[in-house]
Amino acid sequence: MKIIMTVKEFSEKLSLKILTEGDLSRQITGCYCGDLLSWVMSRAREGDVWLTVMGNVNSVAVAVLSDCACIVLTENSPLDEAAKEKALQQGITFLSSDRNAYELSVEISKLI
């Protein structure tokens, strides 16, 4: 059975740093890992946590189009300033972790 949690609960359970604060009450229903933006755009689902190293303005557009619950930048990937501004305008939550996508995926699979 899939357990649904909010972005806030998710970030707390995995000790993720909040880089931009969108809707922290947004429900997370799944997870998608990927860095090829066109691939993510066509495959990520509404409510997914998106794990990526892409901290640029294009990732904000992809998150909006795919209606992701939030973006987690893995391996301490940087969020550039233009992306930060756009994320705040669009209400996209960026989280950060020092772990890689595999390590986070394993932990996420235990949560949802």
Image (tube, helix red, strand yellow):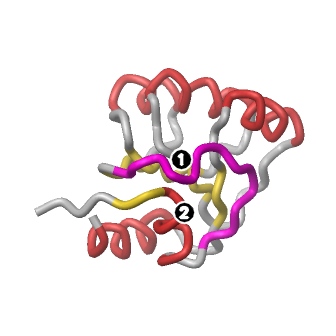
**Up-down: is 29 above or below 81?**
below
Q: Residue furthest right?
A: 81
Q: For mark 1, does the 10 Å Cα neighbourhood hold few (<14), some (14 to 19), or many (20 or more) residues?
A: many
Dot label at residue 111:
none
Disc with the residue nearer the chain's start (1 vs 2): 2
The percent position of residue 84, horizontal first and vertical second, equals 81, 41
Residue under label 1:
70
- Position of residue 74 in the picture relative to residue 56 (left or right): left
| Mark toward the viewer: 1 or 2 | 2
Residue at the image position 54 percent from the left and 32 percent from the top: 63
What is the residue that sits farthest to the front in this orientation?
25
Instruction: Judge left or right: residue 41 versus residue 60.
Output: left
Which residues fall within the magenta stretch? 16-28
Residue 96's x, y, as percent? 66, 63
Label 1 amino acid?
Cys
The relative height of residue 45 versus residue 11 in the rendered view (above or below) is: above
Q: Quadrant of the C terminus?
A: bottom left
Q: Residue at x 37, y 61 (%)?
A: 5
Q: Is residue 52 above or below residue 15?
A: above
Q: Dot 2: what SS?
A: helix
- The quadrant the N terminus occupies is bottom left
Asked if residue 24 is positioned above or below residue 91 in the image, the reply reads: below
Q: CA distance from mark 1 to mark 2?
A: 10 Å
Q: Name the residue: 53% across, 47% down.
A: 70
Quadrant of the rendered structure where residue 76 is? Answer: bottom right
Return the residue at label 2: 8
x and y percentages locating residue 58 in the rendered image? 67, 27
Q: Residue furthest left?
A: 1
**Drawn side of residue 8 relative to residue 80, left or right:** left
Could you say which is closer to the camera, residue 85 or residue 98? 85
Residue type at mark 2?
Answer: Lys
Is residue 26 one of those drawn in magenta?
yes
